[in-house]
Image (tube, helix red, strand yellow):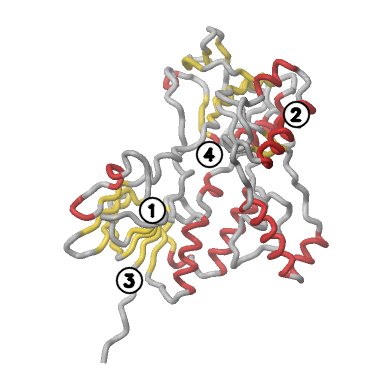
Amino acid sequence: MYGAPMKPSVAILGAGAGGLAMGIALLRSGFDDFVIFEKSDGVGGTWRDNTYPNAACDVPSHLYSFSFEPNPSWSRTYATQPEILAYLEACADKYGLRPHLRCGTEIREARWDDDSQRWRLRAADGDEHKADVVVSGLGMLNVPFVPEIPGLERFRGRSFHSARWDHSDDLTGQAVAVVGTGASAVQFVPAIAPIVGQLTVFQRSPCWVLPKMDHEHTAEEQEQFARQRFRTRVRRWKTWWTYERADFHADAESTKQQTAMAASYIVRKVDDPELRAVLTPDFPVGCKRPLISREWYPALVRDNVRVVSTPITEITETGLRTADGEEHPTDTIIFGTGFHANEYLASIEIFGTAGRRLHDDWADGAEAYLGMTVAGFPNLFLL
């Protein structure tokens, strides 16, 4: 008589939404021999890292949540960072993931052992861990990108990336430079503009911005969502379908309509024709990530805010110098310059059969079968 089949041990990298979902799926399927390795001191991933002012999701809350764990208590259409983090922490508690968490443990290397047919994981502290299966939930937005601008090391003021916000000193009355005008800057610039002395926003290229259709959910709405769970699922499905059927072809009718709406919006919000020209892209909506905000344009037209589109050539001891020779005195530089999203799994070295290196195989770009597995790297799965 045959014995019960052996269940493999599993190592999950990252305790963000993906890693938590993987752990929950394993438990629900009867697998309990797994560890979730997380470099920070708790769960949440990007929603633990990004604590900048006004941090929020630009996907509606009822969709930006687990399908198996709807939340009737979202406070608004687009939840903010503290609320999303609290939701993920509550999921970790509810589904019993805490015993499987190993926080403060950053896995720097995963190496397949051909002899034992197992993965050997090396942590930043030198400890080694073993597993039959490795599942990466590290995502693409976990390694901040700071451009290599000459002179940064000699800047005498304070500088930090928006994903590593420095809360040690507030910005009240300071001269602040923000480098970048992407998804994070669109949120934190309006939050800091009223309190700083002077705010200079350095823009490499403009993005289309559409008004954010956001509203608070009333207590009555929350009660209905809690009492009539189907309402939550219906809302989620409608939101999903709206995103799923989006067509971003340049000549698509929806693209033309969205571009016309965005162009009309900037005309209504920015009276200065010179500033409006600087902020207007020369491509349709969808060629870059579309942004949503009702506060972005009002922030940029404030008397203490200036938008500079001339390229930065160097950073001096006291500020930033642009290609036209002008120096912009600055107390604090904030980089809203995104992440190494094109360097997938940049924070870890992975070696497969016969020592082959994953980043060498991906020298021309990351690719995986069905987006999940890579030949030559047994029992490695990517979320």
> Of all residues shown, which one is farthest toward the bottom?
1
Q: Name the residue carrying label 3.
A: 8
> Of all residues shown, which one is farthest toward the top?
325
> In front here: 333 or 215?
215
Q: In the rendered view, does 299 fall on the left or right side of 120?
A: right
SS for dot 1: loop
Residue 240 against residue 281 in the figure, above or below = below
Q: In the rendered view, does 207 fall on the left or right side of 304?
A: left
**Which of pointers 4 and 2 lies earlier in the amino acid sequence?**
4
Q: Name the residue carrying label 4.
A: 163
Residue 307 position within the rendered picture, expressed as x and y whole percent measured from the top left: 64, 20
For the residues labelled 4 and 3, the Cα–Cα distance comes to 36 Å
For the residues labelled 3 and 1, the Cα–Cα distance comes to 21 Å
Q: How crowded is mark 1: few (under 14 residues within 10 Å), some or many (20 or more)?
A: many
Q: Name the residue carrying label 1.
A: 105
Kind of residue indicated by mark 2: Pro
Label placed on residue 298: 2
Front position among marks 4 and 3: 3
Q: Are marks 3 and 1 in contact (CB under 8 Å)?
A: no
